[in-house]
């Protein structure tokens, strides 16, 4: 998929969503302390991986092993 297709897709499918920094429960990796939000993509059903997109590169910072572990899905 292209980045445009990912951004346009439903967030709980093959899409994405942005999560503000304050919602992340995990420690902040070195080099990403200034990030204000993180791009969340799904990797297995609704399980998310969160990271930062810099141009065409997606830096995966966290992979949530269990639903609700990384942030509150509300």
Image (spheres, grey):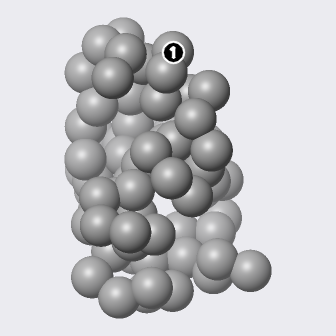
From the viewer's side, name the closer residue of 73 and 13.
Answer: 13
Q: Residue at x 63, y 81 (%)?
A: 72
Image coordinates for residue 11, horizontal then vertical, percent:
60, 49
Judge the density around disc 1: few (<14), some (14-19), many (≥20) Cα neighbours within 10 Å.
few
* Quadrant location, the C terminus: bottom right
Q: Nearer the viewer, residue 50 or 4?
A: 4
- For the residue pair 46 and 58, the one nearer the viewer reads as 46
Asked which quadrant contains residue 59, the reply is top left
Picture coordinates of residue 69 (x, y %)? Answer: 43, 86
Q: Is residue 40 visible?
A: no
Above or below residue 24? Residue 11 is: above
Q: Residue placed at 55% from the left, 76% from the top?
A: 71
Tag 1 residue: 4
Judge left or right: residue 21 versus residue 42.
Answer: right
Image quarter of the N terminus: top left
Note whether 9 is above or below 62 in the view shown.
Answer: above
Q: Is residue 16 left or right of residue 65?
A: right
* Residue 73 percent coordinates (x, y): 64, 77
Q: Inspect this view and state whether residue 65 appears.
A: yes
Which x, y percent locates residue 63? 27, 66
């Amino acid at each position: 998929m292209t980045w445009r297709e990912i951004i346009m897709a439903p967030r709980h499918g093959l899409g994405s969503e942005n999560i503000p920094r304050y919602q992340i429960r995990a420690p902040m990796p070195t080099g990403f302390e200034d990030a204000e939000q993180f791009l969340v993509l799904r990797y297995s059903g609704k399980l998310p991986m969160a990271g930062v997109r810099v141009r065409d590169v997606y830096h995966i910072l966290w992979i949530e092993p269990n639903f609700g572990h990384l942030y509150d899905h509300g």
